[in-house]
Image: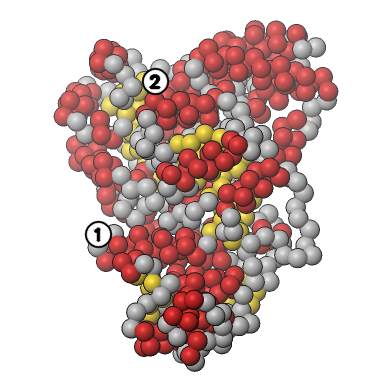
Amino acid sequence: MSSSPLAILRETFGYEQFRGPQQAIVEHVVAGGDALVLMPTGGGKSLCYQIPAIARQMNGQGITIVISPLIALMHDQVGALHEAGVSAAFLNSTLSFAEALDVERRLMRGDITMLYAAPERINTPRFLDQLDELLARGQLSLFAIDEVHCVSQWGHDFRPEYRALTVLHQRYASVPRIALTATADALTRADIVERLQLEDAQHFVSSFDRPNIRYTIVEKKEATQQLLRFIEREHDEDAGVVYCQSRKRVEEVAQTLCEHGINALPYHAGLDTKLRQTHQDRFLREEGIVMVATIAFGMGIDKPDVRFVAHLDMPKNIEGYYQETGRAGRDGLAADAWMVYGLQDVVNQRRMIDESPASEEFKQVMRGKLDALLGLAEATDCRRVRLLAYFGEKSAPCGNCDNCLEPPQVWDGTEAARKLLSTVYRIGQMSGIGFGAGHIMDILRGKTTDKVNQFNHSTLSTFGLGAEYSEVQLRGVLRQLIAIGAVAVDAAAYNTLCLTEGSRAVLKGEVPLMLRASVSGPAQGKPRREKSSAKSAAKSAVVAALDDSAQTRFAALKAWRAEVAREHNLPAYVIFHDATLAAIAAIDPRSLGDLEGVSGIGAKKLEAYGEAVLEVCTGAA
């Protein structure tokens, strides 16, 4: 086989052409250049180091070390490489001592093209000694650092063990490095470059746009019921991920979904390790499972047919939101990113920042990131334009987010904000203590409650001054005030509200607040989008061109693939993607020659599965 990147792409992986910047990245790395690659989930990052690894070994340059933080990802990627006929292995805690020794012996003999390992193992003296020996023999070809945003304290998933990867440049300066991530803003990128000493690396930044994902953000009102309605109306029997902030919430939501006939599983760090692995394996290998999880789940999950990602609590920042929503629709077909959020989400996130032991500089950056996410949630213009602008990318309105499809009404909340702040101020003057958001709103709206009577707050000059505002409107105003730092939440005093230095400009009317009229659902009189639209679009995209007999073949091929996947202990998509099966079903192959050139069928897969595929197609006729 030729060592040219295009030949490897075609013969090993079964794809005719590179996508986007893949070819430029691959050629740069094959030539020995360092690279920092930012490419959205599903954009084909893995090929950007796998093809150089194969090419460089064929050219006698040795072994590639792939640094990955995830055991599940290592297992599936090594399995996929074996299916494609590539020698690969991993070193992690799932191996016995004897198995790990065998992998190390193969490594030192040069029998492995790619070795996957966690950053913790990379930095052990034993492993570094082995790398030293490979370097001395001229057999250390390339370092690929996946999920590289983990190295940055400004990133959404900082992992201290990634910091120690500076040793790669210090100890192996002559070995090229490719660092890859799907998510990093300008600050995070700069930190990655500095920490890993990638100053000379060429940057390859792809578009962050995922046009197949529809972004929808709604106001939180009975979040679990909202989620149920969303799944039942739009994603019945679809695979999806639901993110919750706490472990308790994860288990409650998973149980509720199951009680309503939805095949849901919980996943969080507090579960038994074996149970957690079982749930992850089921999600990857079975169809139609909804994983309810904390952010402990998801990084590196390659499942292509996740049709939705839902958030029942606000993430910490846009990077986290983008990374998590990006796990939907990796196959390029229609998918949904759906989130509910409310005032308490903003209060909780702000409190976690304020109470953290981090430096004031770090807190200030985190507050800015939270503000940007809240700006996305409260936006009245195109969500996608806002999201891409955060990563420095200009775009036009997408026509495929909730705001584009159903433009919200807008109102000027500046005067309401001034009245809220005045109420907080006057309560402090009168009572000398703080009160929570609900009581503040009751006073402003002129509601006579037991607490209002107890503290004689009906005598305040602002009592009833905001009677024209609904609670929904005032909660939106408070979210904005907390986000911009014009109101502080004192967690030590039962989440009471107090003024800040930032209050002054709002009270003077110098800071306008333009707000959505409502984000709780479609505006009155506007049509709701067609039931199961994303699901229908996704499924029809696969089978739309297939006639009845081809659909029969497609179903038979999926059943055969499931059996093979079970035998190999791999997710079905590692054997063949749905798109490959659909292409096979469409051509109704009668010979191995008919299968050559089908996207996703490389030489090894043709040899391994060609005859079986022909039998399945013939049997389905």
**Image mark for residue 393:** none
Residue beneath the point at 39% across and 34% down: 271
Q: Secondary structure at mark 2?
A: strand
Question: Neighbour class for label 1 at 10 Å: few (<14), some, many (≥20)?
Answer: few
Q: Estimate the spatial distance between the alpha carbons at disc 1 and disc 2, rounded to whole Å.
A: 42 Å
Instruction: Between label 1 and label 2, give the one nearer the viewer.
Output: 1
Quarter residue 447 falls in = bottom right
Q: Residue 62 at x, y = what percent?
A: 32, 23
Amino acid type of the residue that numbered disc 2 sits on in the rendered structure: Ala
Quarter residue 19 falls in = top right
- The answer to whether residue 591 is above or below residue 112 is above
Q: Residue 439 at x, y = what percent?
A: 48, 75
Question: Neighbour class for label 2 at 10 Å: few (<14), some, many (≥20)?
Answer: many
Residue 67 in sight from this viewpoint: yes
Q: Secondary structure at mark 1?
A: loop
Of the numbered discs 1 and 2, the one sitting upstream in the chain is 2
The residue beneath circle 2 is 88
Quadrant of the image for the C terminus? Answer: top right
Residue beneath the point at 25% across and 30% down: 121
**Image mark for residue 357:** 1
